Amino acid sequence: MITLHGFAASNYYNVVKHVLLYKQIPFEEHLIFSGGDEWLEISPVGKVPALTTSDGRHLSETTVICDYLEETYPERPLYPTDAGERAAVRQIMKISELYLELPARRFLAYAFSGKGAPEPVKAEVRHVVNRGVGALSRLCQFSPWIAGEEMTMADIYVHYVNKIVGSVGSEQLDWDILAQIPGMKEWNRTLRDAAITREVEAGRVANEPAFQAYIQAFIASGKSAVK
């Protein structure tokens, strides 16, 4: 049995969970926020999510896990067979990560503490996000899926990237970021209403009290970052 380690407040965790559900792969969930040496044996840098495969191998990093699942469980494929089309899907994923999600993630510490980010940080993030908005406006097709006629890994990945961008990023910048990409918000709503997405969201809601308790304890400890 595959084990998915982490917590459902993590958008990266939910990417992997969505892929597992989409591919109808049996798995169990192990709730963990952080840990000591035992956790580092599973996730070498202590990041969420991590996956223990059915043969006992431990994997971390979301895209690594997703590629493993795609290659090991090829049923219901999430990448095109054509190499160029696969690269186009991965390009959308990488740009959304580097130019939307990671810049918006800089605001998480401020959001958890209920504060606004300093103006220089906001200016830096806005500059990077503007580049991502421009790139994705050119690359995303929404016809009806983000990379064309078939659902791909990019649809799942970008939907959960948008969770951070559309809440933390937009709130801190007072700017509806997703509305700047033609078709993005409409596509996002369609995917949000899918049965698997609703199941993943139900897990996130159920996990929220435990996650908030962890965050409050984390802040009280005086640590400087949250994964």
Image (cartoon, helix red, strand yellow):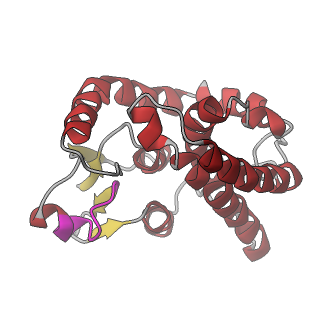
Residue 178 in percent (x, y) is at 73, 36
Q: Main secondary structure of the magenta part?
A: loop
Relative vertical location of residue 80 with respect to residue 133 in this rendering, above or below:
below
Q: Residue at x 38, y 50 (%)?
A: 25
Res 36 quadrant in image: bottom left
The N terminus appears in which quarter of the rendering? bottom left
What's drawn in magenta, residue-wise? 40-49
Res 180 quadrant in image: top right
Left or right of residue 168, residue 90 in this image: right
Residue 44 lies within the magenta run: yes
Relative vertical location of residue 180 with respect to residue 152 in this rendering, above or below:
above
Residue 205 in percent (x, y) is at 37, 24
Residue 56 lies within the magenta run: no
Q: Decide which of 98, 191 is in the foreground and name it.
A: 98
Q: Decide which of 118, 211 is in the foreground and name it.
A: 118
Do we see residue 185 in this rendering?
A: yes
Q: Decide which of 200, 96 is in the foreground and name it.
A: 96
Relative vertical location of residue 207 with respect to residue 89 in this rendering, above or below:
above
Single out the residue that lies furthest toward the bottom: 83
Left or right of residue 102, residue 225 in this image: left
Single out the residue that lies furthest toward the front: 119
Relative vertical location of residue 140 with respect to residue 38 in this rendering, above or below:
above
Q: Residue at x 79, y 56 (%)?
A: 131
Q: Residue at x 71, y 61 (%)?
A: 89
Residue 153 in percent (x, y) is at 61, 54
Q: How many marks?
A: 0
Do we see residue 100 in this rendering?
A: no
Q: Residue at x 27, y 62 (%)?
A: 46
Residue 65 in percent (x, y) is at 42, 64
